[in-house]
Amino acid sequence: MLLASLEQVVFGYSDVPCLEDVNIHIYSGEFVAVTGPNGAAKTTLLKLALGLLQPWEGNVHLAPHNADGNKLVVGYVPQHIAAFNVGFPSTILEFVRSGRYVRGSWLRRMSKIDHDWTEKALRQVGMWELRHRKIGELSGGQKQRICIARALAQESDVLILDEPTTGMDQESRFGFYELMQHQVKERGKTVVMVTHGLSEVKDHLDRIIELERKDDGGWKCCTMTSCSGHFVPVG
Amino acid sequence: MLHYDFMQRAFCAGGLIALIASALGVYLMLRRQALMADMLSHVSLAGVAAGAYLSINPTLTGFVVAVVGAVAVEYVRKSYRTYSEISIAIIMIGGLSTAVVLMSLNQGVSKSFTSYLFGSVVAVNKTELWLMIFVSVIGGAFLFLFRRPLYQITFDEDTAKTGGLAVNWISLAFSVLTGMIVAAAMPIVGVLLVSSLIVLPAALAIRIAPSFNAAIVISMGIGLAGVFSGLSASYELSTPPGGTIALVLLFILVTGISVKKVVLKYGTKRFRKGNELKELRDSPMPRFSKDGLSTKSDSAG
């Protein structure tokens, strides 16, 4: 099932486009990595796909429903969240539990299912023992973990992760890649992840999207299928 | 003291404003809009001046202009997403300069300006009290019903949007509510007290609260305690109520932060000596787990 598509997308922040002629299709059940050097507009690409930025030209489509016909739930883990810097007064448990708010109405009481999902997500990222800590007291890697836990707790159909392994040690990164592969292979989720550690994760991936510099200085988007010469097949 | 009608109304109006403004303050501070109350009260002055110039009820025009200012700041904020305070400064300059120009066109307005600047919590009339009750009920209902979306939006708007929340509409409603509360409270407590009630309790609550919900409750408690003790002190010492309440709140803030520092200092010593270090040392390194089993079993494996 086609979950997201960007067709002939052009986007820029000033009067010069930073992305041109982007054509990407993301299907359900894929583990996709987006890679490219610093400043290659990887985060911009994710934000365009999520609808957080509007393209100058072209079409962006995100499926409203998942394969079961239910509302598509997207779990987004940004690279930076400003609230962490202003001492947001919240516990880890409170924060991860907020992922459950997308399930059902705003006013309903948190059920045992909600608590179970919250606990499971926190255990999956190894943060259950620290659940009563305030989020402002955490290290960079731990902050990434609880953001991932929140996305897992909301039972997202699609996980969009912007450099989620920043601040993690090597052992944690490998554990994280296995967890994401498990989400894709065993649970049928879709994972799109911006990463610089392609060599570490490529064995788990279905597809790679690479942003490359064009001759005129802009960036173009190449995928395994469109630029197969650039990549060694993975998976 | 409470057998006087005016003191009963002052405690009632002051208590309502304390509860609603201090709860609102937690969200405003975390959205980097702590000066929103200051801005809206200054913008509201332009409405008061326009009302006086056009011979319309100044409270009403002040109310409308504050709400318009709240909507305007929401739009300007989008141009300065990381530095929300810049949008506040821009709208405040616009409001205050308009007020000054309108005031110069009608010299008779100057006197009523003073009452709006400093308010008069002990001279609250029934109409102002009912307006405050009306706005407090709407504000309380909004903050209760929207507490979960507001938590998500306050934390991060992008993730809230991708989670399917109508962030723009909720944010706009929040700004309008802020405008309504500030405009309703301003003639009663004045520009000075509105901002002190929004900023000071929240500033302490955010530092000492163990959780987000606790921060809201603690902020409301501090606001209420500050207003009631400030009003009592003002009555006993014959000092201006607005300024006294603001000073009491400032005193609570400074004391609270000092106490926290002392507790942290001695708490750290206890931490070094006690078993907590051993507990931390013996606790397993956090590991990712596919099935969500406990980290202890992971580390054992």
Image: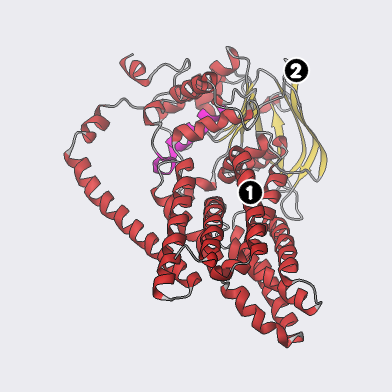
Q: Up-down: is B122 above or below B162?
A: below
Let me know if residue A85 is in the magenta part: no
Instruction: Find the distance from the CA under tag 2 to the CA under tag 1.
Output: 40 Å
Q: State the image coordinates of residue A69 (x, y, percent, origin top left).
A: 75, 17
The foreground one among B261 and B118 is B118
Q: Amino acid at mark 1?
A: Val
Report whether residue B183 is seen: no
Q: Is residue A145 left or right of residue B24?
A: left
Quadrant of the image occupied by residue B6? bottom right
Specify the segment rendered in magenta.
A134-151
Q: Which mark is residue B137?
A: 1
| Prevailing secondary structure class for the magenta stretch in the rendered image | helix
User: Which residue carries the number 2 mark?
Assistant: A69
Q: Up-down: is A141 above or below B266?
A: above
> How does the figure colour the protein chain or chains?
secondary structure
Q: In the image, what residue occupies the spot 16% across and 40% down?
A: B273
Q: Is residue B186 left or right of residue A90?
A: right
User: How would you rate the neighbour count of disc 2 (Cα within 10 Å): few for under 14, some for 14-19, many for 20 or more?
Assistant: few
Q: In the image, what residue occupies the spot 39% across and 60% down?
A: B253
Residue projecting furthest to the top:
A186
Q: Amino acid at mark 2?
A: Gly
